Amino acid sequence: MDTTSLSEHFRSVRRATIALCNPLQIEDFVVSSMEEVSPTKWHLAHTSWFFETFLLKPYLAGYKIFNPHYAFLFNSYYEQVGSYHRRAQRGLLSRPTVQEIFTYRDHIDEAIEELCEKIADDVDHPAWPVLELGINHEQQHQELLITDIKHIFWTNPIRPAYFDKPIGIPPVTEQAWYAIDEGVYTLGNRGEGFAFDNEKPAHKTYVQASQMARRLVTNEEYQAFITDGGYQRPELWLSNGWSAVQTYQWQAPLYWEKHDEEWYEFTLSGNGPLILSAPVCHISYYEADAFARWAGYRLPTEAEWEVVAMKNFIDGRFAIDGRFAEHGTFHPSASSESSLQQLFGDVWQWTKSAYVAYPGFHPAPTAIGEYNGKFMCDQWVLRGASCATPRSHARLTYRNFFPSGTRWQFTGIRLAANQ
């Protein structure tokens, strides 16, 4: 991406963040419903703090910090930058006001424009890759903003809707399988386009002959798992998963509720009858693994997933994709295609691969090195993208990651099997 299109992309992404806030009332911006969920106001401020801290302060001569208190309030976890406000207490702050945060964003935007004008002719300026990182960082928070608002609204007993949009789900196709040939494959980012550090370096990996499901697991299939006593059968669960089922009294995916023997699901359009043909989502790794075992299969490795995706990634475009944030419904859909479906979009797909470093990985020596590297333990890799992911943010080698019990993200299931 050249410098002109990068600065334009910055403006576009910043506008998209604000557009996501348009359906909200001022009271919605300040709520946190659990420790993992941040207030909308915090997302707006944190993404601006990121640009201020890692781009403007080091590269824009004479830049004036908007508010010195924001370095503490809106730092997320960068220890090398300084101390920060506890994540669990982000929803306790009524000040700074929402309007002050919007003013802060305007301040940052103006400063970024000034920086881009000053360094535009210097294509090798070190600020350009940091700007690109910040843009992708903001896109991550766009997705988090949506998933967090959904949890906030669901926690509210009156179950408000973010908007009123029809979801529209086509009929599902029969399950089929895509063969993966045994062999040694080169995986990871090869230096083509933007990638986070955890997608590098490219490396060779041996993959055994196997199969991967051509479509995602549906609500109807997951409902059969529930009906068959899936949440009451300890033999299907990993030990920590069974403990989570008992501790949190899980009986169905997050946002499912039963009324008069009928299942309903909360979406950003409010409560509605469960759409059986839609992909199941808001599933933890524990639930995905238990369902796969119940069905007689397993979850794919991230290497298997990337091998299949690589064969369906043509000229830098997704040959097989689903809904992204641009669709506007923020809910996954079934696919009427008869071939491989929804590798990208709709739901993030759990893999059975632990989130660890690729061979030869080295985090950056600066605070930016804390972005991904220090989380490479006790988490699992997810691949693809979701219905809340901006389309331009998804890519072949993207490695999303969450702890085993994560349910509030748009996470789903694609099955795999040995040959």
Image (cartoon, rainbow, N blue to C red):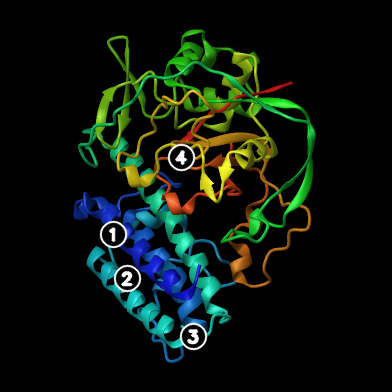
For label 3, the residue is 121
Residue closer to the observer: 179 or 261: 179
Which is in the foreground here, disc 2 or disc 3?
A: 3
364 left or right of 55? right
Asked if 237 appears above or below 68 in the picture, the reply is: above
Tag 1 and tag 2, C-beta contact below 8 Å: yes
CA gap between label 1 and label 4 equals: 22 Å
Q: Earlier in the sequence, mark 1 or mark 2?
A: 1
- Mark pair 3, 1: CA separation: 30 Å
175 up-or-down from 253: above or below? above
Residue at horizontal 60 percent and vertical 14 percent from the top = 294
SS class, disc 2: helix
Query: Dot 2, crowdedness within 10 Å: few (<14), some or many (≥20)?
Result: many
Q: Earlier in the sequence, mark 2 or mark 4?
A: 2
What residue would you read off at disc 1?
Answer: 18
On the image, the x and y values in percent for residue 91 come to: 35, 54
Q: Which residue type does callout 3 highlight?
A: Asp
Residue annotated with mark 4:
345
Distance Cα–Cα, label 2 vs label 3? 26 Å
* Residue in view at x 26 percent, y 73 percent: 103
Question: What is the three-letter code of the residue carrying label 1?
Answer: Ile
Residue 105: which disc?
2
Q: Secondary structure at mark 3?
A: loop
